[in-house]
Amino acid sequence: MTGPATQIILRGTEEACRPWTRRTLTREDWTALVAALPAQPALALVALWADTAQAHALFMDEASGDILPVSTAIVDGGYPALSPVRPAAAWLERMVRDLWGHTAQGGTDDRPWLDHGRWPHTHPNAIRPGPMGPPPEPPEFLPVTGEDLHQVAVGPIHAGIIEPGHFRFTAQGETVVRLEIRLGYTHKGTLSLMRSKSPRAAARFAARLSGDSTVAHAIAFARATEAALAVEAPARANGLRGVMAEIERIANHLGDVGAICNDASFAFALARFGFHREAMLRAANAAFGHRLMMDAVVPGGVAGDIAPGGAEAILAAIAGVEAELPELTRVYENYSSLTDRVVGTGAISRTLADRFAAGGYVGRAAGRTGDARLHPGYAPYPDLVVVVPSLAEGDVDARVRIRLAEITESIRLLRILLEDLPAGALSVVLPMLSGEGIGCAEGFRGDIWHWLRLDNGQIASVFMRDPSWAQWPLLEAAIEGNIIADFPICNKSFNCSYSGVDL
Amino acid sequence: MVWRRVFRTLTEGPATERAAPIADAATQALVAQLDAAAQVRLGRSLSIRHLDAGSCNGCELEIHALNNIVYDLERFGLRFVASPRHADVLLVTGPLSRNLREALVQTWQATPDPKWVVAMGDCAVDGGVFKGSYAIDGTGTGGIAAGVPVDLKIPGCPPAPAAILIALRTLIEANVGGRDG
């Protein structure tokens, strides 16, 4: 049965967007959609973005699996807000206002987000950017009322080797009452730089949206381009993309599990997991010529073939991980000082994870089961029967366990992918055509979605949605009621991307 | 269990790799730069403060790798510190986003003299692929030099840990070489 909100979306004018038809709603229908969304909680908001003329939203019906891109024209400088009924829209609406100047009418939060008042002009993606904004003011934080509260301000520059962002804790004694995160410090104007470029040239920016997910973002971007141009990457390219994506997943999980343990002063785990991460990166370098495999995935296929001896290097690295992982897992489970720090810390509920449609280990540690490799699914995964772990606890420990389980699964997938690599071409030529497409990929953090519109082979408009958009707000919720000293371990267990959402 | 580990260590050796040689010419060039700047020598132990001026986090991954047991940065007398007030070297990544410019300058001011600024990665060197963006302070040659004076550049996207290590050790050798010579 189709839900009430889906029925309204299906009323819209169909637009040529591949592989999922986009529908443009009249303002009345968009308003009706906002009103109908509370009655259909399974219709998850995946992304919200804009171009100069329209606001776009991407919904996924988690009950039926339908993927529904929907748009409405900008009227009177804005569009009816989604944030009152989908809280995950709040940051995205602030981003849309700062970059395009479109106001979310009736939104829950109208404070600036990416624009800190330091760019040469406002609304850089608008047809006519505005004059330079007012001089930087101290940012406004949400009010907190209560007795004996104090604030702790951290950042934008942190004490570790980490990206910049500002964390404003309000605490009662040691206990965090509210955390508010302010980002935007790494905003590089990436979307604006990609416009008017060919997909091949723009792919370098997609690969640098979040360096730790360079392969996954490059795959999502390539798939969006290929969808827009109605071409398919060759089978061998898809196989190699799978190999790279699973190496990236294993390497990131290894690095983060070690770092989470280190935040509980358990340096042994950091040393061993870090050693294996290094082995994975060296194998990636041997196979694809770059430790992080940057720019190895290109629209139309892959940039080059796997090097001679590359497969052997990867197999040796994963054999090393596999040999020590059971012992490391035992160590992780058997040290009470570590258990004390991770179990029950930074927990989020299934309800909250659902409300933000959180993907990746954040969602799966809180009972969700989504994985873009399974749904919507893309080559080479449908043939592989990916097993996706899920736990109910939602705490730091659950996120670690999901990652450990995913390492084992990715090792299994890598062996199959390497053994069954199809022969044939590495890429197809991209026609200089117009079109619109959506691509997705499962990065180590979760589902990545890219949308773009091509105009005679050049990018007219583009948006890249990192999974962190759904996970940062959950981190704010996870730390509530925990002590400030547990923030680093909570933060590392989420490991959201700053650059990925700063654009 | 313990004996198995001892045996493995004896047969396989440590995971930490031997240090690669560093080029004498590069050291001499840095010594000349030090002399020209009349920079006070810092000796054989350098404390490094990392600062992200808008990177994609790729450079940070490779800086983290320097601390793993394969590269083991600390054996060379190099270590990362949590405050600019404890630092001799600012290791800066990213193309210098306008939103972070003030924080970079404040960090630089908080670092006691004498100090070194190392621009790490193509973005920090000249803005990299983000050159020309409205959100980047591209004054002069671009990169972080638009905000603070740069002493050493480590190009790469991102530079491999081995390359970062060689550059940082060259910095030590130049410091020591300058004092002895």
Image: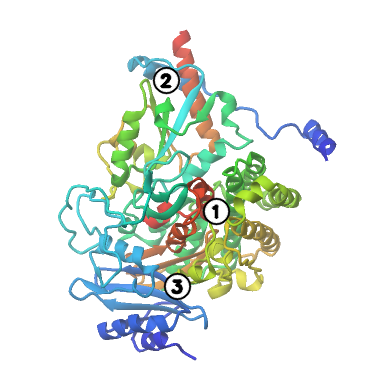
Question: Which residue is identified by label 1?
Answer: A493
Dot 1 or dot 3, earlier in sequence: 3
The residue lying at 48 percent from left, 70 percent from top is A357
> Quick one: A293 or A107, which is closer to the camera?
A107
Quadrant (top left/top right/bottom left/bottom right) for the C terminus of chain A: bottom left
Q: Amino acid at mark 1?
A: Ser
Q: Position of residue A379 (x, y in %)?
A: 57, 70
Residue A204 placement: quadrant: bottom left
User: As displayed, is residue B137 above or below residue A502?
Assistant: above
The residue lying at 66 percent from left, 68 percent from top is A387
Answer few, some or many: residues within 10 Å of disc 2's Cα (few below 14, many 20 plus, some between 14 and 19).
Answer: few
Residue B29 bears which disc, if any? Answer: 2
Label 1 SS:
helix
Q: Of circles 1 and 2, which is in front?
A: 1
Q: Amino acid at mark 3?
A: Ala
The residue lying at 50 percent from left, 33 percent from top is B164
> Gap in Å between the C-alphas at discs 1 and 2?
44 Å
> Gap in Å between the C-alphas at discs 1 and 3?
34 Å
Residue B148 placement: quadrant: top left
